[in-house]
Image (spheres, rainbow, N blue to C red):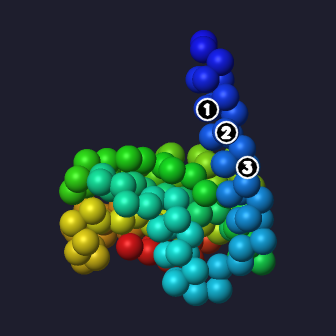
Amino acid sequence: MELSSIIEVIRIKQEVREEMVALEHAVIQSPDNARQIGASFIGDDDREVFLVIMLNTKNRVIGVHRAHVGSVNSSVVHPREIFKCAILNNASCIIACHQHPSGDPSPSREDILVSERLHWMGYTQLDINEEVD
């Protein structure tokens, strides 16, 4: 690996660490707070990105996981990937969010089905606050 590539990897790791340090103090008090965090991680991605924001018992962010990157009009995510990251991070609650690159925030049929599956599977003692589009 070239020195410039190694330096770039180190720079990216540092950016991720700094972003996570800033999130350590973030508390989700409203859907708008979750949207802001989601937007900061997704940015202007041209494909649907499905994020899981993991919270502790005081709604403090303990992690953000990019569970799936889909196509321009769909993101087929399995609940297994969502709950795996939540359990491994000892989250007491999760917020699932994704964007629609089209700009239309209306939930698709698939969005509704994923939300229903998450809530059904969430009865395993892991609270699900809200899905934010």
Q: Quadrant of residue 2?
A: top right
Instruction: Look at label 3 and name its amino acid.
Output: Arg
| Residue closer to the observer: 85 or 15 | 15
Which secondary structure lies at badge 2?
Answer: helix
Residue underneath mark 2: 11
Q: Residues within 10 Å of mark 3 (few under 14, many from 20)?
A: few
Q: Quadrant of the N terminus?
A: top right
Quadrant in which residue 74 is drawn: bottom left
Judged from the image, the secondary structure of the residue bearing numbered disc 3 is: helix
User: Which residue was labeled with disc 3?
Assistant: 17
Outermost residue on the front side: it is 4
**Residue at 23% across / 53% down in the picture?**
72
Q: As drawn, is 65 to the left or to the right of 3?
A: left
The reply to whether discs 2 and 1 touch (Cβ–Cβ < 8 Å) is yes
Q: Amino acid at mark 2?
A: Arg
State how far apart marks 3 and 1 are (Cα).
14 Å
Residue 122 can be seen in this image: no
Residue that appears at 61% across and 57% down: 64
* Numbered mark located on residue 76 in the image: none
Amino acid on which disc 1 is placed: Glu
Q: Is residue 91 left or right of residue 51?
A: right
The residue tagged 1 is 8
Instruction: Name the residue nearer the viewer: 52 or 90.
Output: 52
Quarter of the rendering occupied by the C terminus: bottom left
* Residue 71, position as x, y percentages in the image: 25, 48
Identify the residue shown where x is 45% and y is 59%: 42
Q: Position of residue 90 (x, y in %)?
A: 74, 55
